[in-house]
Amino acid sequence: MSALCVRGKAGFSGYSRVLCARLSTPPHQQPPGTEGRGHSTEHNPREKADSRAQLWSRYREMKKLVYDLLPPGVCNLLNPATICSNNEISLADIEIYGFDYDYTLAEYSNELHKMIFNTARDILIKQYKYPEGIGKYEYIPGFAIRGLHYDIQKSLLMKIDAFHYIQLGTAYRGLKAVPDEEVIELYGGSPHIPLFQMSDFYGKGSSMKQFMDIFSLPEMTLISCVTDFFITNGIDFDPVNLYKDTTDAIRDVHVKGMIYEWIEKDMEHYILHREEIYAVLKRLVRHNKKVFLITNSPFSFVNKGMIYMVGKNWRDLFDVIIVKADKPAFFTDRRKPFRRLDEKGSMQWDRINSLEKGKIYKQGNLFDFLQLTGWRGSKVLYFGDHLYSDLADLMLRHGWRTGAIVPELETEIRIINTEQYMHSLTWQQALTGLLERMQMYQDAESKQVLKEWMRERQELRSITKNLFNPQFGSIFRTYHNPTYFSRRLIRFSDIYMASIGCLLNYDINFTFYPRRTPLQHEAPLWMDQLCTGCMKTPFLGEMVHIR
């Protein structure tokens, strides 16, 4: 977290203390006649009117505080180029840096998604004989977000939180939202998805698939568009066949090398931030760090891209280079040996007894890699964009430190820094605190007031969600819980950032300290809780009344 973030949070704490103190209601301030019992005023019209007036008075007081006392500069708390830490990690302890290639070293423009969508759509029509009408659909940038789950049998694309609950309002069949009532009915009267129905360790399951790859954005959009065509035209279809055909068409685009051809023909158009990549690698080498590359992409493609980003001598910056690694199997399957490639990219037959600097190796497995290099444990830091294929096994099985590249982070932080988001979220938190503290008022008129507040709270939640994505909201949060994506991000990465270039903002020996996240039972002493509204917990001075 940048120093800017820390200073901003500290400056915000005074405001939150005022908010918390105003919202807490010690017993001596309770309405007359209500000590020691719930605030029921069913038999006293005067108390009923007084309680309704008191509720609205407290509401207006809180709203004035939220909109008048937000300090100047509060909307620039976060630096979009920050590195966020889930676990304490000192770069001084890191001796070896490893990198994936696609969407880690090489970041691509969104134009590539349009090409993938259009090509896979045409494959469905020409090779799988899907209706010509599907050809009218164009790629919809921003329709889907990464981390969504897809129920294959029910044709539902949806966002699920860390507790396996569907975020209502984010379930789509085709291009149309499915009503909340229907979603709940489809899952047996609850929006909860049982563990056995969820995807497996790598995001794949027999009936549920989680889309974790950045390349999956056009895939989700194509599935939704094809489904929309069949539903709109009243055509009966098998959802399992539709899913398989669509994913196979997308796979063909990758397997047949079309993406490689597009990028190689116009690297300037598709590859972003190339200057930063050279600067990061050069700095690591200058500080005597070992550097390696493990990618699933072929050498010819990687070679052309690295020449474009770094220069023709790019291989001099790497101690080990492995292509066509077949991750995640590379991390778990011992059977494939390393194969050396010659300068033309042809495989050699000789036994590999060492991994030499400047040479190119294909396939192999992590167990041989560890034996040949001796690069083990927490002195290794590996960066990748796919939480499952790149990072999960390395952290859980082998004890490497891991860094997740999350390009969406930059956009989301910029949204968080807006005045609209800050005001909406802060008032939403204050209103939630009001609801919790004032729910003891049980007369009919007070209940009506609380219902109005509940409706306003839901509207605020929808506004906040739509700032990120009108269909699915933020990739990191449901309305209040972390998403399933966030849960995996925290589990499988020590640090995460928008791009590799973010490393340039920190000293080579910098230590990342995660903020102590307050647990629900802890007193509101932490800055993060003060910032986001500790209104639901009285301050320590008032706890004497509770005790």
Image (spheres, rainbow, N blue to C red):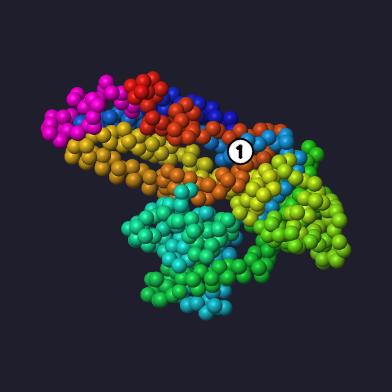
- Where's residue 477, x and y in %? 47, 46
- Which residues are the magenta region? 21-50
The answer to if 34 sits in the magenta stretch is: yes
Q: Is residue 56 left or right of residue 223?
A: left
The relative height of residue 11 versus residue 364 in the rendered view (above or below) is: above
Please report the residue visible at 67 percent of the width from the left and 49 percent of the height from the top.
Answer: 397
In the rendered image, the quadrant that contains the C terminus is: top left
Q: Quadrant of the N terminus?
A: top right
At 57% from the left and 74% from the top, the residue drawn is 123
> Between residues 335 and 481, which one lies in front from this camera angle?
335
Residue 374 shows up from this direction: yes
Residue at (39, 39) in percent of width and height? 424
The residue that appears at 81% across and 62% down in the rendered structure is: 339
Q: Amino acid under label 1?
A: Asn
- The x and y percentages for residue 74 are 47, 31
Q: Nearer the viewer, residue 217 or 538?
A: 538
Between 73 and 257, the one nearer to me in the picture: 257
Residue 469 is at least partly visible in this image: no
Left or right? Give the position of 171 relative to 315. Answer: left
- Quarter residue 377 falls in: top right
| Rendered position, 192 above or below 283 | below
Foreground residue among 238 and 309:
238
**In this picture, residue 257 sits left or right of residue 136:** right
Image: 392 above or below 495: below
Residue with the mark numbered 1 = 87
Magenta span has 528?
Answer: no
